[in-house]
Amino acid sequence: MKKIFFFLFIFSVLFAEDLLLDVMFTNDIHGGIDRYEATFMNPEFPPMLGGGGSAATYIQSVRNLTDGKKRDNFLVDAGDFFQGHPIGTMSKGDAVIDYFNMVNYDLSVVGNHEYDISEDELIETYAKAKFPILSCNIINKKTGELVDYVTPYLIYEKMGLKIGIIGLTTTDTETMSFPEHIANIDVLPAKPELIKYIAKIRDQVDLIFVVGHMGIPYDPQPAYNRRYKSNKPKPNEVRRWGYDAQELAHEVEGIDLFVGGHIHKGFADPWVDPVNHTLVVQGYAMGSNVGHLILKIDAETKTISGYETPAIREGMMITLFEDEWIPNPEISAEILEMQKVAETGMNDVIGEAAVHLSKAGVGPQNVIGNVVCEAMKEFTDADFAFMNLGGIRADIGRGPITYRDVFDVMPFDNKIVMFEVDGNFLKEIIEMRVSGSRHGLRVAGINVVINKKRESYNRISKLLIGGEEWKADKIYKIVTTDFLLQGNAGLVLLTKIPEEQITRYEKDLRDAIVEYIKNNSPVTMEIDNRWKYDDKSKISASIKAELEK
């Protein structure tokens, strides 16, 4: 039925007087070019998504409408293209670049997860691309010039129009990447660089698009109201995060369309800035959909006069259901061959889950998070294990567990590290992650009670380590990942730990989870009393005594 609506709509707009530009876009594919079940839609009876094969079918159906005179198209990607699904991660992006080449992407921009591999490896991957890689704000630290694997902008000619497209990368990259992977680059603040390049091309083009690895808030209008309609002055404090797409659309003049990403939240319709009238679009993640916006452009004024979306209910978001968009057989076959190479051993059963190991939970605690932290603790025999909230990406269902299941939980190649510090430092780690509006950590080895009504850095009411009262001067063994040890997720204090207090293991966290499952199968876990919020709790006598020493 959706196909019928789609083609009826296409028939109706073919005879419009305006020029029509089909802007197809993807963002945050994270290697999701393979077929997979959409368990996020229905865990019990998930529909099958056709991956890159279904995307190719949809893309070609739109391109078939192009005549180059009254109608044309773009296909762009807004970054984070490979890290996530095994076919992307294990091939270090090569498989996804091959797919992009097959379907003839016009361009891609650099996302923060592109630096999950080293810069040298990324350069090798990008060298295989038959399309340009854009970013106007990644520079080489030594030269101060743009890195040589990106282009800041491109100018296209379509239907007598000149369209400039500028690429942007989120400055969050510097707080979300391994330092050694980005040691040679700086990601410049987005706003001044965008203003600079808009001024550079403004007189050369009719329309300006931005494709940026940065997105709009989950609830765009309330966020806009808080930012720009509130009578409260904007604080002058240093920004914790860089600009997002909504802020740039509002604060930078001259952008006609902004294609965003990074946030993993798709929108059926564009968000339109009420002042600059910039259209901002963004899709879902993991290759589950292709975004599609049909721009109407006045042929005389060469300005955007309106837009349409191709689907009645989904709007711009074309979900790639395999039974609706029959996968292109040639491209699907190529993807399957690459997948077989990348996923050798992925379906081997390593154990069993006695319960559903879910991401749902209470506060920062969930069942799968407890499993991951217990796995780190068991591997090192540490006193305390912790993970950031965003580091765990999937559930594991009840029943047989495969290596693929563990990969979905932990797609990142993080190594295990252990360090020895005193109790004061241990307490500071937890206090830091519950300060302000922060929501805590995944943990193992402790029992902690938090009172969020108290002032920041004094919110722990009770703290047990291994069942015993916390001691300020006792030396504890703490295990986490090298990603966090390098100061990511705001844990800058970890960078102060002397190297002689650190033990680095050549062990992927993913493999430690596999070992834990094998050693503890069938795996059971529950939400317990390791982490509790109680805004009426008072500081325990033992903590008070330790702090008064």
Image: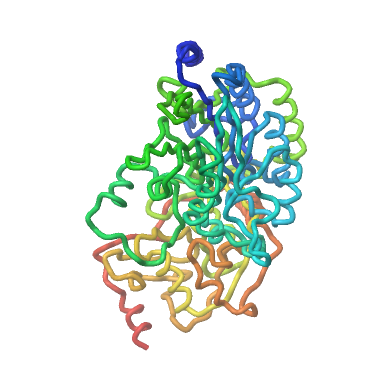
Quarter assignment of residue 487:
bottom right
Q: Residue at x 41, y 62 (%)?
A: 239
Residue 10: give x, y in percent of width and height: 49, 15
Describe the colour scheme in one phrase: rainbow
> As rendered, which of 141 and 28 lies closer to the eye?
141
Q: Residue at x 73, y 46 (%)?
A: 125
Quarter assignment of residue 56:
top right
Q: Residue at x 72, y 40 (%)?
A: 129
Left or right? Give the position of 203 relative to 407: left
- Where 250 sits versus 444, above or below? above
Quarter assignment of residue 64:
top right
Check the picture and name the quadrant holding the C terminus: bottom left
Residue 387: give x, y in percent of width and height: 52, 59
> As rendered, which of 14 and 56 lies closer to the eye?
14
Residue 505: give x, y in percent of width and height: 68, 66
Left or right? Give the position of 460 relative to 280: left
- Where 86 sits versus 297, above or below? below
Residue 379: give x, y in percent of width and height: 63, 62
- Where 416 sits versus 259, above or below? below
- Where 533 sits versus 40, above or below? below
Identity of the residue furthest to the left in this view = 231
Numbered circles on residues, count: 0
> As rendered, which of 318 and 131 lies closer to the eye?
131
Res 457 visible: yes
Res 374 visible: no
> As rendered, which of 208 and 403 lies closer to the eye?
208
